[in-house]
Image: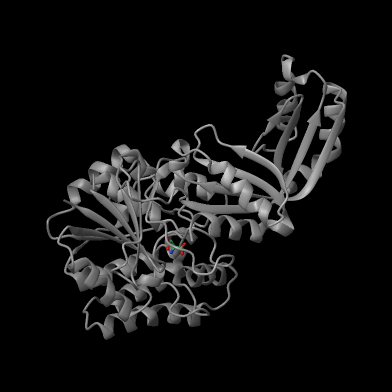
Amino acid sequence: MLKVLKFGGTSMADANQYRKVRDIVRADPDRRVVVVSAAGKRFSDDNKITDLLYLCHAHLQYGVSFDSIFDTIRDRYLAIRDELGLKTDIESEFAALRKKMLGGISREELVSRGEYFSALLMAEFLGFDFIDATKWLFFHYDGTVDQEKSYPALKALVTDRGAVIPGFYGLMPDGKIRTLTRGGSDITGALAAAALDADVYENWTDVSGILMADPRIVDHPKTIERATYSELRQLSYSGAQVLHEMTVFPVREKNIPLNIRNTNDPDHPGTLISDEFVDRKNNQRFITGIAGKKDFSIVTISKKGMAGAVGTLRAIVEIFEDNAVPICYTPTGIDVISLVVPTEKLTPHLYTVTGELRAKIHPDSIKIADNIAIVAAVGRKMAYRAGTSGKIFAALGEQGINIRMISQGPDELNILVGVDEKDYAATIRVLYDAFVK
Ligand code: ASP
């Protein structure tokens, strides 16, 4: 059994957090590969090391002294090392880095150093091998990850002693360091788990998993205990703040479960995401989560006879495509179709789109409603449960919330309701109270 763990910035922020990480790793002998972020914030108005490194490079670029930022960064790592009684020669490493900076260093190489120092210290602290990301995480020239080369390379490097790997960066074919997008250590962790065919990818952060609703709207929402990768996709598409699908792609591809856990509350089981679950019979909750987004417009086109006509839908879609307006949802009725689109994408092309619709479709009417919010109730169990939509509409109706649009995904994984933005928070609360509480 092998578990690959990734610890985010707040888990690496100071010596005390390092101790928590060590305790978590030691609690389970299967936890043998650890991917780390750069030191993050210790308190809310603290700085993230990665941000400081970007700032440092900007100073360098414009010929402004970077000494004080550089020293702040070095001192954060020195403090961690000294408080933990470690021996890694951070001073020489930083001296060499300063020299390299003066000779010209790429922005990506400089910002990657946060993860590098975190991993060096954590490797010593855990007594694990340090495996630099440049030794195994290889990119193609187009910036995509070369999995064929990277996966065997990591496999060959990891031993029974355990390994700590810096997240966020890897090597380009020309030998230069390249970083992933911000937050990219999540991706490194997923790639490492996939490379090693891990049994689970544990993503340790500072929240106990994914919440069933936005905590700014619902008071202390419950944690999602289990979700499938498809539900995760629906939730993040619908606005929930969860790991991006791209992040989990390497583990999903290999059917490796992802467990989101809290370093500050290690006994909490967090959220487990997997391809499918055999759901316990006694688990009555059939909504996995509720998410939502604002700033949509609904374009409703009516035309007598449209339902039986050939090619009208294609012609409509083409007009939106030609104007680069993405279509998010398309609820239809008889002789009427609505297209739900992001307002900011529609606004600049509004007159062209409506003009072309009139010229090519000859509709009876085109109506546009702005300030629409879309709220999604997501749940894998909705498919075989009768009466879900009825319950949703009844709950919203009772609260006097007018539903402007409804749509159920053909996979029956979600039910979407479009409401006026003023009803957005109330809709989420009503659904949460009706299905979760
Ligand atoms: N340190 C990088 C960032 O702040 C990557 C990460 O933490 O995942 O974006």
Residue closest to the far left: 160
In this view of the protein, which residue sits in the foreground, 334 or 174?
A: 334
In this view of the protein, which residue sits in the foreground, 217 or 151?
A: 217
Q: Is residue 418 left or right of residue 107?
A: right
Residue 15's spot in the image, x, y percent?
31, 80
Residue 295's spot in the image, x, y percent?
71, 52
On screen, 436 above or below 257?
Answer: below
Q: In this view, does 154 lie to the left or right of 354?
A: left
Residue at (70, 57) in percent of width and height: 423
The number of discs equals: 0
Q: In this view, does 42 lie to the left or right of 163?
A: right
The quarter of the picture showing ligand 1: bottom left
In this view of the protein, which residue sits in the foreground, 153 or 265?
A: 265
Q: In this view, does 121 lie to the left or right of 221?
A: left
Residue at (41, 62) in percent of width and height: 112
Residue at (68, 51) in percent of width and height: 397
Visible residue check, residue 144: no
Q: Quadrant of residue 278?
A: top left
Residue at (64, 56) in percent of width and height: 427
Residue 349's spot in the image, x, y percent?
80, 40
On screen, 248 above or below 364?
Answer: below
Visible residue check, residue 362: yes
On screen, 177 above or below 150?
Answer: below
How has the structure been colored for display?
A: one colour
Residue 260's spot in the image, x, y percent?
36, 58
On screen, 335 above or below 310?
Answer: below
Q: In which quarter of the image is residue 25?
A: bottom left
